[in-house]
Image: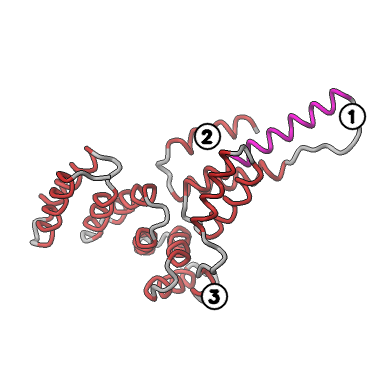
Amino acid sequence: MQGADGSEKLARAVALFQAGNQKESLQIVENIVEADANNLAAWQALGLMVFQSARWEDGIKALRRASELAPFDAGIYANLGQAYSEIADFPRAEACLRSARALDPSNPDTGKLLVHVRHLAGNGDAGADEFARSDDADVEVHYEKALACQFLNSTDGVIEHLRIVVQILPAFAAAHKSLADFLWHASELRMLIAEFDALLSRSGEDTRDTDLAGEAEVHYREALTQDPELAATSAYFGNFTRRT
């Protein structure tokens, strides 16, 4: 959360930017996020400011940090989708726009851009309504349930709810990473059970589930695709590849 001083500085930076003083305004905002890496408003402002100079990559980096802080903000995903479409990165543009559309199906601009991006990517002519969130698919509720299941040590429950979350929000990098972690954990646990059964000479099927490990790899890779700068994802995926 930004303090009063940070809010005043950000307001001054926005005023300077609107007055045409882009260099000074950008310097102020960059100083704000350097001092407070959790300042959501400043990351959003930084991303939108550099977009005005067509610095799409820099804007994307700033908005990725904003989406990390506010993963259920439709506007951030919509702006990311716009930026990715400008640099012709259509797969990531589609993931972001699908996420934005799911969170705010009433925004006509997001829907139009999503259909356009899907067409450019050669993904058919499906309408944007395909990705609008249904009443029984509240993604924030599923995410909260995943956290509750984690507290209760219910790995299967966490996996069940996180699968729904990443289906609705394909650009939610941290959710992909968390799902991959729990899938890997479940795969390792089942392997240990199988090895224990073998030691006891129990008959029956091998309970190891290689599909879980394969699914974990898919979501580690997707997490890195959506946010390549997440150090934790790179570290966990490195450990995963060495163990599998």
* Bounds of the magenta segment: 182-200
Q: Is residue 220 visible?
A: no
Question: In terms of depth relative to the viewer, which is nearer, 18 or 113?
Answer: 18
User: Pointer 1 and pointer 2: residues touching (CB < 8 Å)?
Assistant: no
Q: Which residue is mark 1?
A: 202
Q: Is residue 66 magenta?
A: no
Question: In terms of depth relative to the viewer, which is nearer, 29 or 114?
Answer: 29
Label 3 sits on a secondary structure element that is: loop
Q: Which residue is mark 2?
A: 236
Label 2 sits on a secondary structure element that is: helix
Q: CA distance from mark 1 to mark 2?
A: 33 Å
Q: Quadrant of residue 47?
A: bottom left
The secondary structure making up most of the magenta span is helix
Q: Position of residue 71 (x, y in %)?
A: 41, 52
Q: Which residue is mark 3?
A: 126
Colour scheme shown: secondary structure
Q: Position of residue 108 (x, y in %)?
A: 39, 76
Going from N to C along the chain, the mark reached first, 3 or 2, is 3
* Amino acid marked by disc 1: Arg
Q: Is residue 194 magenta?
A: yes
Q: Is residue 158 left or right of residue 31?
A: right
